């Protein structure tokens, strides 16, 4: 399965273990590299810069010849730690960045000085053309089957539309829970795939057993969109608590979002409140369960080691 992605990252299989808030960690990425794929961790999974530094050093000393590791950076104003995260990652080094939710110009400029690749999350052609013009190395095409913050286009439509208009590689994100679904995205024209939700139910994942078991017990039909986490629609498991609190913004948030000057501050507050809610649900045994996941949990039948989950795809 050699593709432009395997060549870019010098990996064996065209797969990136997607960065997942709270879930992704060093143990998961080490297992990913051992299996010949790439792994990515959200920089926000580390509360302090020294913790992020420690993770980078650990991954560098564990790097395999056919594996790669990177970090996900939220590049909009909601991430107050962004400048420090970018600086330390560039200083210590990694193989690639994945940027989300903002303008990646600064990341691209600083990363390329250090020979670090930059892949940018996009959900449509307009975003893709913009990041290509800024010089990114590939786009992560987030489709309507992705977990977390997803796009609105089907995998096939999004991949084909981007390939027709761009000169850089297209990596597909969303809708891959089996080897057949991976091969399908490659046939559509993707150079590789970013896979997240199937790895939540892994032994190495840094979340509670309750969260992992939920990904085994619930399925694709149990995934709903909520605006309660970041203000932007995000997929979660439709637990009784999610049903209780609802999935829509409050009337006050909707009103304030109509004001272009206040909108960014409302979104920042919703992001901070929402991520705190998700953190408690993911790491504690609580009835307030807001578990982020995508429809590919349909294929999670047991809590398994990362290496076994990867074998499902390769």
Image: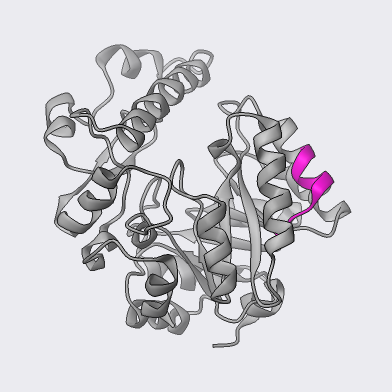
312 or 51, nearer to the observer = 51
Image height of 73 relative to 133, above or below: above
The image quadrant where one finds the N terminus is: bottom right
Q: Position of residue 167 (x, y in %)?
A: 68, 71
Q: Residue at x 76, y 57 (%)?
A: 135
Q: Position of residue 101 (x, y in %)?
A: 54, 40
The image quadrant where one finds the C terminus is: bottom left
Q: Residue at x 43, y 66 (%)?
A: 306
Q: Position of residue 21 (x, y in %)?
A: 46, 42
Image height of 258 relative to 95, above or below: above
Residue extent of the magenta highlight: 87-96
| In the displayed structure image, the side of residue 222 where residue 106 appears, left or right | right
Q: Residue furthest bottom?
A: 1
Q: Position of residue 295 (x, y in %)?
A: 26, 58
Q: Residue at x 25, y 15 (%)?
A: 251
Q: Residue at x 34, y 57 (%)?
A: 144
Q: How is the image coloured?
A: one colour
- Answer whether residue 136 is magenta in the image: no
């Amino acid at each position: 399965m050699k593709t432009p992605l395997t060549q870019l990252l010098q990996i064996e299989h065209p797969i990136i273990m997607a960065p997942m808030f709270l879930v992704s960690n060093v143990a998961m990425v080490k297992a990913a590299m051992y299996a010949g794929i790439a792994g990515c961790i959200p920089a926000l999974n580390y509360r302090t810069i020294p913790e992020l530094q420690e993770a980078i050093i650990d991954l560098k000393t564990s790097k395999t010849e056919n594996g790669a590791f990177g970090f996900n950076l939220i590049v909009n104003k909601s991430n107050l730690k962004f400048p420090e995260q970018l600086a330390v990652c560039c200083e210590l080094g990694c193989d690639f960045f994945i940027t989300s939710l903002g303008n990646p110009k600064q990341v691209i400029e600083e990363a390329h000085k250090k020979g670090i690749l930059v892949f940018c999350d996009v959900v449509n052609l307009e975003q893709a053309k913009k990041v290509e013009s800024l010089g990114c190395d590939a786009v992560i095409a987030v489709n309507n089957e992705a977990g977390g913050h997803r796009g609105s286009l089907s995998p096939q439509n999004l991949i084909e539309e981007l390939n027709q208009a761009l000169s850089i590689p297209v990596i597909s994100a969303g809708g891959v829970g089996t080897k057949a679904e991976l091969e399908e995205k490659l046939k559509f024209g993707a150079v590789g795939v970013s896979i997240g939700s199937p790895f939540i139910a892994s032994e190495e994942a840094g979340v509670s057993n309750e969260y992992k078991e939920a990904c085994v017990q619930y399925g694709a039909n149990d995934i709903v969109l909520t605006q309660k986490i970041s203000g932007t629609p995000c997929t979660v498991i439709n637990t009784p608590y999610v049903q209780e609190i609802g999935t829509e913004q409050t009337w006050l948030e909707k009103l304030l979002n109509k004001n272009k000057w206040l909108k960014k501050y409302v979104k920042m507050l919703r992001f901070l409140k929402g991520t705190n809610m998700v953190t408690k649900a993911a790491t504690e045994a609580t009835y307030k369960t807001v578990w982020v996941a995508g429809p590919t949990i349909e294929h999670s039948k047991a809590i398994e080691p990362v290496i076994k989950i990867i074998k499902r795809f390769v």
